[in-house]
Image (tube, rainbow, N blue to C red):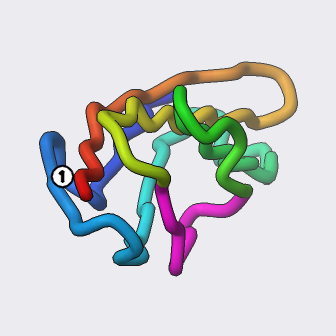
C-alpha cells in the first residue's frame, strides 16, 4: 500500500479558527479482493480528528501539528504523515 496526504500541503499555515480540509489517498495492490480501506486521521496535538478519505471543516488548536493518516485494509496498516502548521 502507498498512502499520501494531498491536502493540505506540507508546511501549510492557517489562521487560528480557520477550518481546513484533510484529503488523503491510498493505493492498495489487494484492491482486486474488494477489501474496504479505512482512513483514520490524527494530530500529535489534538489527537483523533476523524475517519474518512476526506475530512472537511477540521479546526486545529494553535501550534505546529503533525497530521498522520493511517490506512488499513483490515490486514495491513500503512501510515502517511505530514507536518501541518496552524498559527494564531
- In the rendered image, residue 56 lying in the magenta stretch gets the answer yes
| Magenta segment | 51-60
Q: Residue at x 25, y 44 (%)?
A: 85
* Residue 19: % across, % down: 42, 76
What secondary structure prevails in the magenta region? strand
Quadrant of the rendering where the C terminus is positioned: bottom left
Identify the residue position indicated by label 1 in the image.
9
In this rendering, position of residue 25 left or right of residue 29: left
Who is closer to the viewer here, 64 or 3? 64
Q: Residue at x 71, y 56 (%)?
A: 50
**Relative side of 24 to 37, left or right:** left
Mark 1 crowdedness (10 Å alpha carbons): few <14, some 14-19, many ≥20: few
Q: Residue at x 71, y 42 (%)?
A: 48
- x and y percent of residue 31 in the render? 65, 46
For residue 38, side relative to residue 66 (left or right): right
Q: Is residue 55 magenta?
A: yes
Quadrant housing residue 15: bottom left
Asked if residue 64 is positioned above or below residue 37 in the image, the reply reads above
Q: Is residue 50 above or below residue 43?
A: below
Amino acid at each position: 500500500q502507498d498512502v499520501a496526504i494531498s491536502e493540505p500541503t506540507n508546511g501549510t499555515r492557517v489562521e487560528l479558527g480557520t477550518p481546513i480540509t484533510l484529503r488523503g489517498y491510498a493505493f492498495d495492490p489487494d484492491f482486486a479482493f474488494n477489501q474496504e480501506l479505512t482512513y483514520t486521521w490524527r494530530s500529535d496535538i489534538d489527537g483523533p480528528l476523524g475517519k474518512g478519505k476526506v475530512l472537511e471543516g477540521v479546526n486545529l488548536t494553535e501550534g505546529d501539528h503533525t497530521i498522520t493518516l493511517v490506512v488499513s485494509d483490515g490486514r495491513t496498516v500503512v501510515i502517511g504523515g505530514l507536518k501541518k502548521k496552524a498559527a494564531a
